[in-house]
Amino acid sequence: MQGEVQLQPPDSQKLSDSAPLLATSPSSSSSSDHEINAEEDLESGGDSASAPCCRICLENDSELLEDELISPCMCKGTQQLVHRSCLDHWRSVKEGFAFSHCTTCKAQFHLRVEPFEDNNSWRRKVKFRLFVARDVLLVFFAVQTVIAVMAGFAYMMDKDGEFRNSFNDDWDRILSKHPIPFYYCIGVVTFFVLTGFLGLVLHCSSLNGNDPRMAGCQNCCYGWGILDCFPASMEACFALVVVFVVIFAILGLAYGFLATTMAIQRIWQRHYHILTKRELTKEYIVEDLHGCYTPPKLDAEHEGRLKMLKLM
């Protein structure tokens, strides 16, 4: 009828009121699922980030099957665990007391002594000689690089070749016809002159000011009289410069031979010590303390041996 208000049943009204809620419930459940998955991802990521790793190589696992993570000292947190192979390599190459002590917390390692028979001694000796030869060649190539730079600078200063062509009538005219050997010889002479000059300066600076030998150094450094000969004759000054170049070149040869001998001896000793300590790491094994550090006790005989080798 007209004018009558049609009322909906209460059940249909409830259904219409709850319909929007029922329509959005799948999306809300999916969003809650996404949140749960995100929380699980964060938890799994946190577990992977907090996985124990080596403090030297920063890896969780090692290429060696029997190389486990150990706790050899009082370090905690990210510095607590280390691979045994990484620690043994560090003990062999690091100078000082790193063989028997932690370089971070300064705690002494618990060393277990085991008999060791080296069946690959010949291989170690070959590697030792190869490492020494490699370092000597590196020093040689470094010196040759410096000489080449000086030769290139001399070539840039004599682009027109006037200085090189001035030796055409002398005994070294054969050398002057070839620019590369000529400027290389100029670089060699310059290198030894600078070496002799720097060696003399370092020798004089190492002496005390009250030392009587300093009088000779002062006369050598300040008593040349080069500036006094300029008004007299340029030829005399040039001859004096040539004399001092020859003197410094001879000193450079002497200082260069001394420095080369010391460098080769240093390289030999360094690799020999590394080889010896690598063999000792197989005999003196670091124990795993599992985070519970106690003061170590080592036999007096082995302690004296390590102290004699300056490893403890």
Image: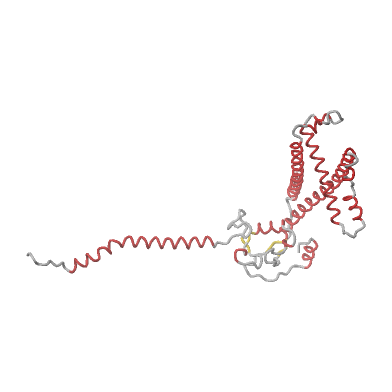
Residue 180 is situated, as x and y percent measured from the top left of the image, at 76, 33
Above or below, 124 relative to 1: above
As drawn, which residue projects farthest toward the front? Answer: 231
Instruction: Looking at this view, name the residue that lies furthest to the right.
Output: 212
**In this view, which residue lies farthest toward the left?**
1
Q: Position of residue 78 (x, y in %)?
A: 60, 63
Q: If the image is split into quadrants, where does the C terminus sit? A: bottom right
- x 71%, y 67%: residue: 108
Residue visible at 32% across and 60% down in the picture: 26
> Which residue: 82% across, 50% down?
262
Report the front residue among 86 and 233. 233
Using the rendered view, name the quadrant where residue 85 is placed: bottom right
Count numbered badges in the picture: 0
**Nearer-the-camera pick, 229 or 134:** 229
Residue occupying image coordinates x 69% and y 58%: 90
Nearest to the observer: residue 140 or residue 79:
140
Q: Is residue 49 left or right of residue 289?
A: left
Q: Quadrant of residue 95?
A: bottom right
Q: Does residue 244 lie above or below 163 as drawn?
A: below
Q: How is the image coloured?
A: secondary structure
Vertical relation: 61 (above or below) 139:
below
Q: Quadrant of the N terminus?
A: bottom left
Relative image position of residue 257 (x, y in whole percent): 84, 46
